[in-house]
């Protein structure tokens, strides 16, 4: 997945944010297949179940059948055509989700070899907030951080101070 280069800064920020809001005694359904960050969460003491690789635009079975206390979605919603639908189906009362933000100086990410590894959406923070609110979630906390790269050029320079990742903790709005 990362060809030997793990996003250590992103993992560090994501885990710290998760630990700030979610106790290790709460069960987690992590949207997406088991991945290197799943292992990071498990090593931190979390009990994780992952979805099985089903198309979350069409198949909500894993979410509907889950009894987890919390749903996490780390860099998942940008891959979906209609993330609103899965957000509405979540039964858990807590959500921790992160996305890569849209960068004005870079096109949306698209793998040429893996059709699952493409971004249909790259949100601005307000767009993601609106999506969550419309789907019945109230954002309780949020954070952003940069993703500098060790390359030379204009874009690498811009990545040093332009926020790239956005993470939120939200709770289901009760009727």
Image (cartoon, grey):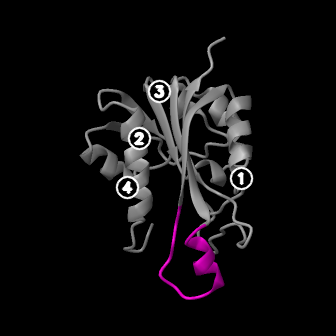
Residue marked by disc 4: 12
Q: CA distance from mark 1 to mark 4?
A: 22 Å
Q: Is residue 69 above or below residue 110?
A: above
Q: Position of residue 134 (x, y in %)?
A: 74, 30
Q: Which residue is mark 2?
A: 18
SS for dot 3: loop
Q: Which residues are magenta?
A: 146-161
Q: Nearer the viewer, residue 61 or 117?
A: 117
Label 4 vs 2, first from the N-terminus:
4
| Figure check: 149 above or below 131 | below
Q: In the orientation shown, which residue stands out farthest toward the bottom?
A: 152
**Residue matched to label 3:** 66
Q: Earlier in the sequence, mark 1 or mark 4?
A: 4
Which residue is at the front of the view, 97 or 87?
97
Which of marks 3 and 1 precedes in the sequence? 3
Q: Nearer the viewer, residue 7 or 65?
A: 7
| Marked residue nearer the N-terminal end (3 or 2) | 2
Identity of the residue drawn at 52% across and 22% down = 93
- Pick whichever of labels 1 and 2 is earlier in the sequence: 2
- Dot 1 corresponds to which residue? 124
Q: Is residue 66 magenta?
A: no
Label 2: few (<14), some or many (≥20) within 10 Å? some
CB atoms at circles 3 and 2 under 8 Å apart?
A: no
Q: Residue furthest front?
A: 161
Q: Quadrant of the C terminus?
A: top right
- Give the alpha-carbon distance from disc 4 to disc 3, as whole Å: 27 Å
Residue for point 74% across, 67% down: 104
Q: Quadrant of residue 90?
A: top right
């Amino acid at each position: 997945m990362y060809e030997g280069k793990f996003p250590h800064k992103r993992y560090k920020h994501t885990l710290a944010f998760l630990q700030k809001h979610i106790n290790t005694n709460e069960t987690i359904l992590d949207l997406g297949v088991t991945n290197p960050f799943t292992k990071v969460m498990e090593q931190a003491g979390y009990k994780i179940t992952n979805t099985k690789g089903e198309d979350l635009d069409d198949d909500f079975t894993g979410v509907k059948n889950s009894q987890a206390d919390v749903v996490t979605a780390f860099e998942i919603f940008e891959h979906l055509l209609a993330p609103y639908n899965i957000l509405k189906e979540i039964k858990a009362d807590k959500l921790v989700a992160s996305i890569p933000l849209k960068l004005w100086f870079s096109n949306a990410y698209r793998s040429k070899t893996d059709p699952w590894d493409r971004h249909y959406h790259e949100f601005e923070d307000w767009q993601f907030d609106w999506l969550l609110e419309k789907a019945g979630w109230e954002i309780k906390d949020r954070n952003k951080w940069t993703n500098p790269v060790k390359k030379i050029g204009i874009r690498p320079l811009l990545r040093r101070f332009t926020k790239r990742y956005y993470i939120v903790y939200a709770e289901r709005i009760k009727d």
